[in-house]
Amino acid sequence: MNHRIVFFAFIIFSFASAQTDSAAAPSDWKHTLIAGLTVTQVSYTDWAQGGENSLAYTLSIDGKSVQDVTVTSWSNSYKLAYGQTRLGSKGLRKTEDKIELESVLTYKVGTYINPYASATFKSQFDDGFKYNDAANTKSKISSALDPMYLTQAVGVGYQPITQLKTRLGAALREVLDDGKYGYADDAKTATTVEDSKVEGGLESVTDVEIKIEENTLFTAKLEMFAPFNNIDVVVVRSDNTLSSKLNKYIAVVFNVQLINDRSVSARTQIKEGLALGLSYTFL
């Protein structure tokens, strides 16, 4: 099976359908699209104190399309990011690589608590490597669109205030790869390397969006998945961003991501980034 077909099928399902409905009732849809670019460069020539030349960049796109009508609310969001850095003669290395798509359809039956159906997709654009600078070697640990994580869920959502919404439901989580890196492998089958893993479980997703000042915004997403066959082993993903617009085009962004997934690593993965760069709101 070519797993890349799944990627394009998800895009068609989540976003092309939205555009079709948008044509029928364009006033019902609200779209936002923000693009960002950060670049850092340092160069030395005959610098007595020493140092290494460096170049780093990150390009990001953050968008959302929401249709909020009397009976339903349909939210489609996408976060894309890619970045690299070069330090001295070590060549370019990936520092950021993200594809995250989410589609949530909510039926309004109450004031605060409402049923929903959702689908999410997570993957990456480029190959990933683990580096050993002492031995001057690198080993490939992932590829473009490999692995891929898909989750489909149904349940109930709760939104007591505008800034906070959370949902809890029964979910189906799929991990797909080409069988090369073991992300979908079942450790219990020693002679076979699986290229897909499907687990049923409970999903919890909480979104927070707080406008601290007119130009400062804090956003956070906490995702948890507990498989039915191992309910005490919870996969946790947390993405937290504090962004401040200095003017129309310049923004400071501080981001912290945490991932606790024992099938990938026995320890909690933490990623922190602070960037100053260009930011432009298209929609």
Image (tube, grey):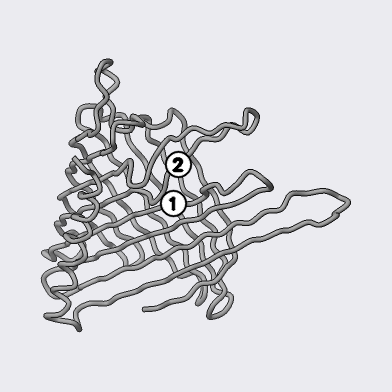
Name the foreground residue: 208 vs 39: 39
Name the foreground residue: 111 vs 10: 10
Name the foreground residue: 46 vs 277: 46
Q: Report which residue position mark 1 lands on.
A: 97
Left or right: residue 87 compared with residue 258: right
Q: Which mark is residue 72?
A: none
Q: How far apart are marks 2 and 1 (CA)?
A: 9 Å
- Bin the neighbour count of mark 1 within 10 Å (Cα to Cα): few under 14, some 14-19, many 20 and up: many
Name above or below for residue 254 compared with residue 25: above
Q: In which quarter of the image is the N terminus?
A: top left
Camera-side mark, 2 or 1: 2
Q: Quadrant of the C terminus?
A: bottom left
Picture quadrant of residue 101: bottom left
Looking at the rendered structure, the secondary structure element under dot 1 is: strand
Q: Report which residue position mark 2 lands on.
A: 128
- Bin the neighbour count of mark 2 within 10 Å (Cα to Cα): few under 14, some 14-19, many 20 and up: some
Residue type at tag 2: Gly
Name above or below for residue 16 compared with residue 240: below
Residue at image position (43%, 28%) is 266
Residue 123 horizontal/vertical position (percent):
34, 48
Residue type at tag 1: Asp
Tell me, yes or no, whether the two marked residues, 2 and 1, touch with CB atoms within 8 Å: yes
Left or right: residue 7 compared with residue 236: left
Looking at the rendered structure, the secondary structure element under dot 2 is: strand
Residue at image position (88%, 51%) is 48
